Amino acid sequence: MATLSQRVLMYLFFAATLASLASCNSNALDVGEPGNLVPHTVDENPDLPTLSLNGSQFHIETFGTPGKPVIVFLHGGPGGDYRSLLRLQDMYNGHSLADNYFLVFWDQRGAGLSRRHAKSDVSIDIYKEDLRQIVEHFSPSAPVVLIGHSWGGMYATAFINEYPAMVRGAVLLESGPLTGALYEEIKTRLISLDFFSEWLNDFAWSQQFISADDHARWDFQRLLGMKQSQPEYYQDMNTDPAPFWRLGAAANQYILEDGMDDKSLMTYNFADKHLPDFTTEVLFVASGNNTVIGREFQERQRHLYPQSRLEVIPGCGHDLQWKKPAECVVAIRTYLNTLP
Amino acid sequence: MHIYRLFILVPALILAFSELFAQPINISSVTAHEQRIYAQFGLDDAFTATLGYLYALPIGSQEQPLILSTELALPVAEFDLRDYRTAISARYTALRHDNIAATAGVGIVARGTDNDIFSAFNIGARAEMELGYYADGWFAGTSVQYDKTLASHITNSDWYRTYFFQEAKDGWYGSTGGNFTYSLLGGFAVDRSELTLQAGFSTTEHFHLPLLSWHGTLGYSYRI
């Protein structure tokens, strides 16, 4: 009869053997393989609409007739994608922005369904160069209108600060902080870091199951913060949430790090170069419900531009472009009609 | 036997028949046939409460028994039995010189989770090495643990499918990753009780720092 020690060792060996056999099962799915837990990017799916420039491959879609004035849309994040902006090209009251403009929607470098990159290939300067080449590609002889949501508003501002002559006008849909100083003022409220919150503990607990050692796993795991991490943004995440195709977790981290100093303080300044000379009026749009970067915050930061005005869309949070697209389009159209 | 039955059988066997270790412990104070119950609380892959049982199995030298234990850990931010971790492990003192000792351990882990994006059941394996100074009544040391997932059954949530990626694939996945955990640990004992502290950080198996990489736990064990 086996002793207790032999029995215990036998069970350990048995369990380890079964688990090892299971892990070698050739029918098992590969967690790092795009298409299993997250969608393919343009590198893995040749059927996706793409554009190659500046050493990368971008997921991109256009609406309207080439030759018309160009609007380039900039999604949030960093690391989001343009899926949640697409309602802005829908038809409202019988009209679409695509009737009068050529609309360019694209996923930024390392985000959405665009190509993933190493850290050395993702920075704010590289992002500005990507956008410069996109503008040049679609509108080589005329400045464009930029419409950016959240991080996209920051991105638009960083671009205008660098290349003001390439921009005819801009709409910033509840933009994130345009300077590091503003970011530092509100950073404790951007994400809920209550150590006993369900979302944070779910995120931490999930790290035992999925380790972020490739983009597919990193992007999938980062989704865990999406639903509950920003309660003061008042986005309705249960009913018709603003959708993504796929988060770009690496791009999110690399761009944020690029805006920081070595003490992890945000030191970027998107208003320090040519922005004070950009005399075209810029439209700021805020949601009525966001208590972090809503009306009050946009009212403060819009003065970084020499000419600006603020519209507020009531009854929605930070996902205003998805929940109240018709109201956003009315504000955008009214603004576009004022541009020279 | 279909593969999924193994994943029901293995944790059942683990829970029914075996013992494990996880709690830091002063190995110099452990004698053959000793039994302890222990509890741990702290940041351990989330805010987690752990209950365990430890048995010192005489094997070879009576001075260096095989330390076996079993435990159940539950995140406590919002009590949810779908998030859990169980493990069995065995640890043995591999080298000893006076009060300095090195121990090595192995274990099997079964764990589950349920969150906004997916639910999962996972089988993993652990290996651990600990080096420390073990005196009468107190100890201090350092450890490194490798926790490797072997197979996971993942079910994507309806919310994720409906609003984000409809084609997300449910099913058995091979290894979904692994983590190294590096710790400093120590404790002191009074009579039958021992208090322990453990703190450190983790990296992925490819040495990337995860978003939440720190851990720290307070433990208590009682010799019965």
Image: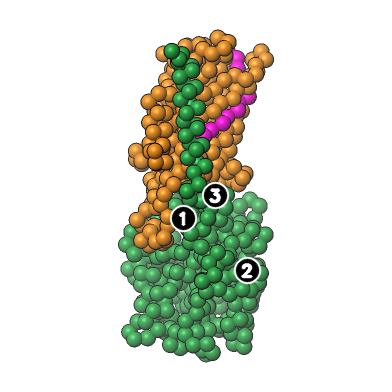
Chain colours: A green, B orange
Q: Secondary structure at mark 2?
A: strand
Q: Residue at x 44, y 47 (%)?
A: B172
Of the residues shown, which amino acid type is indicated by label 1?
Leu
Residues under labels 1 and 2: Cα distance?
23 Å
Which of the two labelled residues, at mark 2 and mark 3, occupies the earlier sequence position?
2
Q: Nearer the viewer, mark 1 or mark 2?
A: 1
**Residue identifier under label 3:** A212
Q: Residue at x 45, y 88 (%)?
A: A100
Q: State the predominant SS element of the stretch in magenta.
A: strand
Instruction: From this view, report whether residue A127 is shown above or below residue B58.
Output: below
Label annotation for residue A179: none
Residue A202 in view here? no
Label annotation for residue A56: 2
Q: Secondary structure at mark 1?
A: loop
Residue A4: percent from the left, percent from the top? 45, 15
Q: Chain of mark 3?
A: A
Residue B2 in view here? yes
